[in-house]
Amino acid sequence: MRRCALITGGSRGIGAAAARRLAQIGYDVALTYRTQRLQAEEVAAEVERLGRRAIVIEADLADPEQARALVREGAEALGGLDALVNNAGYVQRMDWQDISLEDWDRMLRVALTAPFLCAQVAAPYMKDAGFGRIVNVASLRAQTGAPHGAHYAAAKAGLLGLTRSLAMALAPSGITVNAVCPGYTATDINREALTTKPEAITRQIPLGRAAEPDEIAAVIAFLCSESAGYITGHTLNANGGMFLS
Ligand code: NAP
């Protein structure tokens, strides 16, 4: 059966890897970007080489109207929507006392308000299809806090509450809603830290290394698959064992 997925922030990193993984399990894919159009188009071309349809959509998720519109655009272009992966995000390393109200608001709009609005627009399409998967990409920092990114950690922790709330609300419609909490993953978000002080990071990780984006994408794809139909409201940690020590 043909399925359609929308991935926010599909131009790079975890979102790009998720686009490839979802294509491999039979999803046509709409992927969004904010700045990296060429990279988004390259990911779309890879999806098409895997035999699936792909479209790219430009959107700044800090703008609530763009967040709503991108879901409508993706669903109309693909002819439906079965899965939504709320993945787009960014980090801003700063002491909590230096976070301005503008920094705080933008972070919450991208990392929490946009996933909420995208889910609001996506759910009716999923109800029509009688099948739905929503995966919210949160973070290890939702659980541990972040001394140099309090707004990021707060937004991601909010995303876990949203995940559980929507899981309860949408279960009667057969739509599952889950969260993934990646630990350190080798993407542009933390490329500098992983390059300049790799040991400071890897010594915190029982598995001794950062994740590859595809290892997080595999978890996202599982939660979007038919096989994960009895899992909802769950937070799946993919952090190399960081809660073990
Ligand atoms: P990445 O490689 O920097 O990719 C970020 C993606 O989000 C890009 O596609 C980017 O679009 C998009 N994006 C950023 N700000 C946006 C905005 N305002 N509006 C629309 N799109 C926006 O990062 P990543 O590591 O793959 O991160 C993906 C998700 O995983 C994020 O939610 C992040 O918080 C989470 N995460 C990552 C790690 C990690 O260690 N990497 C750990 C825990 C959680 P452009 O390319 O067009 O700029």
Image: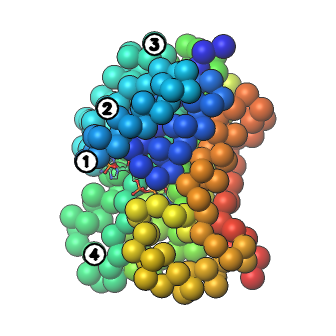
N-terminal label among 4 and 3? 3
Which x, y percent locates residue 190?
Answer: 44, 69
**If the image is split into quadrants, where does the N terminus sit?**
top right
Circle number at residue 135: none
Check disc 1 and report the residue beneath it: 35
- Label 3 residue SS: loop
Residue at the spot x=42%, y=42% of the render? 10
N-terminal label among 4 and 1? 1
Query: For this view, does 112 lie left or right of residue 221?
Result: left
- Label 1 residue SS: loop
Residue at the spot x=72%, y=73% of the render? 207
Which x, y percent locates residue 210?
Answer: 60, 69
Marks 4 and 3: which is nearer the front?
3
Mark 1 within 8 Å of ligand 1, using the beta carbon:
yes
Quadrant hosting ligand 1: bottom left
Marks 4 and 1: which is nearer the front?
1
* Contact between labelled residues 3 and 4, with CB atoms less than 8 Å apart: no
Which x, y percent locates residue 78?
Answer: 44, 17
* Contact between labelled residues 3 and 1, with CB atoms less than 8 Å apart: no
Circle number at residue 57: 2
Check disc 3 and report the residue beneath it: 79
Amino acid type assigned to the residue bearing label 3 in the image? Gly
